[in-house]
Image (cartoon, rainbow, N blue to C red):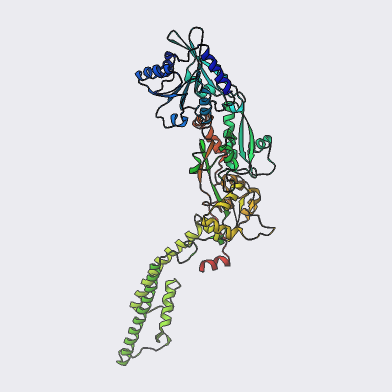
């Protein structure tokens, strides 16, 4: 094809047809049609290099010239740091045109950054853009100029995907005759999503992830992804992005032929060859993917992002039982008071006991003196007048502190004042202590394991949803918490009556309902099943613990510099503004079932009491 195009150009030159461009046609395009400020001229004509730059610079244009007969490096000419839109002018009758257009297609320069102006007098547009130039898509901004009987004609050129063997679509912008422009259509309308939004049933290449055996045909993939219910091996965000893809299919009228991948990411051995869905998209083996991808810094150079809305959130789900309380503040009867308060209370009891003993000794001494002096000769000696021991006074003080009463009742006024003070102190301390303990026992907001490490240390048996990203996480993660979890919870063998390490949500719900079991999955998949099988009290006992995997907003990705990036990104912004995305999110992201029971009373057994007193 390159040889035939070059031969045709040589024939034109031999026949005497001028290779020079008409400057007025060029300036009319730049100043009146596209209104750019920077022009890059690719030509081989000395007259073009002399006339065009002088004319354009006189019109306040920044001009760069490149000789097609000399060596140049296209990425250094068409840089992506341009501060304004740029017009790229190509004299297609030069010998180096085919190489230039081929390199521009390979490097994906037919995009919204550049307005391409092709001077194509005497050449057919199909000759300039054979099927080998596969990057001429709906985002191309290419204007082709040819000669008419009375002047020149401007044509807009694009396709819906030359790599899919889609035909070139050529639409007349207007004619230029006798120095006057006769517009047929606005160029920006012909290059807009409104005009190019009809794909006429073209079949795009798709990719998705279904972690199941024997899923090979497009009909199988479509059948699984289109079902509104949960399917094993299919992540919730896969079906969500499939619904978003359905919005694009209806908007642009195209179909998709899917290929399946068992996983999302990975590399072949120690090489840089990507596996999974990311590898398919990065190598441009798929035009669009019915899946999201995690945010990673090294992926921004390899993929385009067209939409972000799905919040990926996974957690351990389990039902709380009293033996799972791992919080020291709610499981220790010493916690209502700080250490200083306990020390102060013990010192107060000791001081009261010592003072009481001193009062008793003083009172006993005074009574003996009165008896000796015969001040009270008729004092009767009975067992209550006998001096009690220090141990008895300490026991009486402790009983008063515990509000157990006092027997016998002291007769001395000083001791009575002391005992009343002790009772008041005990009353204040006892009321605060009991209210703190009862409130902690009735409160369920902080009961049970609340972190991954506490899950690991708890008696809970754990399982994970049988889906690919968990297996990658366990194989590649170096996190200390995950390593400890694997060693303590996943290394031991399990009996046939126990749930396996990897299982499905429907199989795990009966174990969750029974208690003593935790299941890790994407929470929006589990909540509908839990709401169906749990009663009101069991829903109130439901706990979730995140932290094993990051909570993040997922990216809907395309191949880097894809010809569909701009048009799909614009369509998704429009869908989000009109509420279509929010409607799908509300249906797909099920909220956690609300607790409708006022409170739950947990039975106290021997293990519970021994745990707390320990």
* Badge count: 0
Where does the image place residue 187, in percent across and percent down from the top left? 48, 18
Q: Nearer the viewer, residue 266 or 515?
A: 266
Q: Nearer the viewer, residue 485 or 289?
A: 289
**165 up-or-down from 171: above or below:** below
Where does the image place residue 526, in percent across and percent down from the top left? 60, 47
Where does the image place residue 432, in percent across and percent down from the top left? 42, 63
**267 up-or-down from 284: above or below:** below
Q: Nearer the viewer, residue 386 or 582?
A: 582
Where does the image place residue 415, in percent across and percent down from the top left? 35, 77
**477 up-or-down from 405: above or below:** above
Whether residue 607 is visible to the viewer of this picture, yes or no, is yes
The residue sitting at 59% across, 32% down in the picture is: 246
Image-quadrant location for residue 517: bottom right
Left or right placement of residue 117 versus residue 4 in this view: left
| Quarter of the figure that contains the N terminus | top right
Judged from this view, the residue extending furthest toward the front is: 14
**405 up-or-down from 286: above or below:** below
Left or right placement of residue 224 versus residue 29 in this view: right
Whether residue 596 is visible to the viewer of this picture, yes or no, is no
Q: Nearer the viewer, residue 434 or 259?
A: 259
The residue sitting at 41% across, 76% down in the picture is: 397
Left or right placement of residue 162 versus residue 91 in this view: right
């Amino acid at each position: 094809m390159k040889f035939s195009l070059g031969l045709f150009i040589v024939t034109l030159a031999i026949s005497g047809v001028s290779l020079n461009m008409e400057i007025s046609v060029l300036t009319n395009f730049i100043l009146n049609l596209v209104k750019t400020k920077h022009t890059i001229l690719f030509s081989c004509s000395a007259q073009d290099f002399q006339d065009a730059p002088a004319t354009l610079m006189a019109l306040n244009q920044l001009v760069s010239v490149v000789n097609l007969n000399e060596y140049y490096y296209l990425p250094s000419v068409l840089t992506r740091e341009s501060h304004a839109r740029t017009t790229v002018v190509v004299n297609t009758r030069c010998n180096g045109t085919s190489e230039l257009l081929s390199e521009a297609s390979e490097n994906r320069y037919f995009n919204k950054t550049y307005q391409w102006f092709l001077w194509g007098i005497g050449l057919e547009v199909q000759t300039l853009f054979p099927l080998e130039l596969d990057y001429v898509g709906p985002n191309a901004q290419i204007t082709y100029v040819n000669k008419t009987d009375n002047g020149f004609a401007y044509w807009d050129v694009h396709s819906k995907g030359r790599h899919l063997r889609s035909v070139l679509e050529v639409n007349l912008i207007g004619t230029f005759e006798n120095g006057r422009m006769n517009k047929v259509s606005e160029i920006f309308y012909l290059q807009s999503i409104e005009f190019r939004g009809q794909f006429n049933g073209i079949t795009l290449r798709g990719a998705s992830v279904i972690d199941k055996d024997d899923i090979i045909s497009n009909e199988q993939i479509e059948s699984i992804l289109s079902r509104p219910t949960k399917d094993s091996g299919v992540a919730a965000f896969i079906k969500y992005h499939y619904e978003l893809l359905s919005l694009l299919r209806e908007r642009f009228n195209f179909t998709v032929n899917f290929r399946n991948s068992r996983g999302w990411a990975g590399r072949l051995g120690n090489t840089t060859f990507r596996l999974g869905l990311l590898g398919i998209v990065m190598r441009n083996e798929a035009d669009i993917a019915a899946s999201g991808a995690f945010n990673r810094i090294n992926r921004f150079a390899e993929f385009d992002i067209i939409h972000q809305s799905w919040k990926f959130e996974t957690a351990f789900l389990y039902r709380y039982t009293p033996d799972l309380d791992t919080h020291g503040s709610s499981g220790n009867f010493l916690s209502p008071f700080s250490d200083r308060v306990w020390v102060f209370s013990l010192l107060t009891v000791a001081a009261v006991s010592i003072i009481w003993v001193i009062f008793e000794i003083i009172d006993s001494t005074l009574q003996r003196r009165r008896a000796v002096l015969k001040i009270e000769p008729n004092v009767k000696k009975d067992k209550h007048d006998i001096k009690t021991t220090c141990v008895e006074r300490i026991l009486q003080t402790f009983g008063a502190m515990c509000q157990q009463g006092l027997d016998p009742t002291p007769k001395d006024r000083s001791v009575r004042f002391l005992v009343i003070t002790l009772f008041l102190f005990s009353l204040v301390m006892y009321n605060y202590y009991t209210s703190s303990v009862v409130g902690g026992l009735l409160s369920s907001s902080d009961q049970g394991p609340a972190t991954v490490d506490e899950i690991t240390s708890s008696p809970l048996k754990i399982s994970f949803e049988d889906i690919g990203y968990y297996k990658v996480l366990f194989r590649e993660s170096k996190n200390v918490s995950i390593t400890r979890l694997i060693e303590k919870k996943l290394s031991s063998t399990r009996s046939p009556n126990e749930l396996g390490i990897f299982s499905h949500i429907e199989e795990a719900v009966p174990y969750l309902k029974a208690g003593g079991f935790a299941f890790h999955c994407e929470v929006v998949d589990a909540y509908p099943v839990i709401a169906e099988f749990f009663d009101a009290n069991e829903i109130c006992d439901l706990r979730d613990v995140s932290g094993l995997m990051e909570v993040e907003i997922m990216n809907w990705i395309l191949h880097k510099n894809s010809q569909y990036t701009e048009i799909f990104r614009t369509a998704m912004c429009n869908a989000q503004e009109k509420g279509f995305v929010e409607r799908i999110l509300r249906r797909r992201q099920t909220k956690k079932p609300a607790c409708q029971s006022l409170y739950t009373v947990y039975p106290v057994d021997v293990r519970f009491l021994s745990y707390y007193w320990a």
